[in-house]
Image (tube, rainbow, N blue to C red):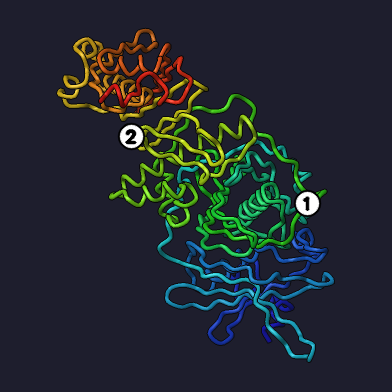
Amino acid sequence: RLGALAQNEHVQRAHDPTLPWLFDGSAKDGDATVYVRRLDPRRDVGLDHHRIDGVPVLPGVVGVEMMVQAAEHATQQTACALCDVRFAAPLKLHRDEPLDARVEVRVNAGEARVTLVSLFVGPGGKEMRREHFFARVLFAGGAKLTRPAPWTLELAREPNVSRAEIYRRYFHGPTFQVLDKIETVGENGVSARPLAGAPAWLSEQALWRTDPVCREAAFQAAGVWEMTELGRMSLPSAIARVDLVGVAPASGLLLTIEVRKRHAGPEGGVFDAWVRDENGRVYDVMHGYRTATLRDLGPAERFEPTPPHQGPPPRFLTLDLLEVGEMLAAGAAEVVPHYLSAAEQTRFGELKTDKRRLEYLAGRVVAKRLIRQARYAGEGAIVPYSAITILADVLGAPEVQIVGEPAGPLVSIAHGAGVAAAYLSGGPGLRPGIDVEKIERRDPSFAATYFTPEEQAQAQADPDRRLTAMWAVKEAMVKALGVGARVDLRELVTDERDGTWHVTLSGQAREVAEALGVVETSIEVEHDRERVFARVQLASKNRLPLGTAAKTPREVLA
């Protein structure tokens, strides 16, 4: 009988020297190839150190390893990914007694459907079968593992949670305490470091195929996020997809775990997770890792709220358009209402092109993210995205409204060169303006149309970079004035000497500044290899709302 394989492992290995080290035997059973391992918490330390309510439980990551090794041996192919991984029921070893775990492999249409089961004798003496884990193992078409897409950890702070505090709450014994440090926790995820080394979980342990230690560390990091943010304990439930790299990290490498929350509800959470080294090489990727809520933490188990980072609130922020595109591709139906208020969603739906919609959403996300970070850093307040509305006024300048507040802060938004950027007012009477431009060669007519002869002469030494910087300063200035590109930009003459920028106004641009009561101008310009950022802040003696000035920009331009 197949159930006796574990008792005859030496005979089995003699007959099949290729049998993976994890298993004691294998045999055909109808349309399935079945692999068996005798699990014993008295010899398998990992089982002894992985207990729930005192009962040894087969770790999900070891179950995944068993399913992959069995599928590869049965098909003589190399797996590239797993899909539809389900941890349906824990495999428990009651009374610490040994138990045979069976892995059933069925090959169909180029993939293996793998089920991990156990057999037990029911009350009537009948042998019964219980399914614990399931996965589809794929052998072709796997995507090359790359660095994760751009992403921002929201309202990030250092949790100051020690390993001792984590594992006082977790049920893991010493060899399953694989987290070294929780580095940063945010509203939408966590960054952590796994403990170096590969613990010996199973007897006669050899090389792993799927690096379950890294995956277990990612599981635990997601669990810590739920404990710190939601005050609950959860267990692994499913994984939509696991991409297999096939190479374990070398000893001594500094690894980072990045867990991104996709959704969290009362029933559990959904996360994406990456494990990578300091050079960016990826060793484990999980998409759609799903947890099931086990219980709420008791009052003595809850972590103390973590204060925000110390220091002045941020005033400038950028966002890669790739990040926003990735969010939309993953699920626009969830992303749009999360970030946009009802009025903004209406405007978003009116936009005709994907490019316009992407830029609109990115501009709102980066501006709201900046406002939220400033509020959190300054007051500890968490303002929902949907409670903030940013709509354009009659001249196109952004106006911020926050639910329950009479007036929102002044903010300026720009997008270009692959990013969106926002600049927040530093206080009452301070008007911000921002622009971002790609450094590139421009047609000669560009200089003649928008720059004075004196400005063109200044730009001769490095025309591409210099004209781009001048243009960005002009754009940021008209945004700070609240008029957009509705004045002749040659009325704003830029000048930079020894790193200090100045703008001299004339014509309508000067009239608008006088109407606003502008008394001081601050200009900051930053370059990287391909972009220029210009930030302008105007100090106005009129600290009242815009419409109460002697003349509004709209009246000056009428």
Relative placement, left or right, of 70 versus 524 is: right
**Quadrant where the N terminus lies?**
bottom right
- The residue that appears at 26% across and 24% down in the rendered structure is 557
From the viewer's perspective, is 541 left or right of 299? Answer: left
Q: Secondary structure at mark 1?
A: helix
At horizontal 79% and vertical 64% (from top left) the residue drawn is 43
Tell me the amino acid under the disc marked 2: Val
CA neighbours of label 1 inside 10 A, class few (<14), some (14 to 19), many (20+): some
Which residue position is annotated with label 1? 169
Location of residue 323 with respect to 453 vertically, above or below: below
- Is residue 259 among what the camera can see? yes
Q: Nearer the viewer, residue 131 or 29?
A: 131
The quarter of the picture where residue 172 lies is: bottom right
Q: Which residue is mark 2?
A: 394
Q: Quadrant of residue 254?
A: top right
Q: Quadrant of the C terminus?
A: top left
Q: Is residue 210 left or right of residue 5?
A: left
**Residue at the image point whose x is 74% and y is 82% from the top:** 120
**Which label belongs to residue 242?**
none
Q: Nearer the viewer, residue 77 or 189?
A: 189
The residue nearer to you, when weighing 328 against 99, is 328
Q: CA distance from mark 2 to mark 1?
A: 55 Å
- Identify the secondary structure beneath mark 2: loop
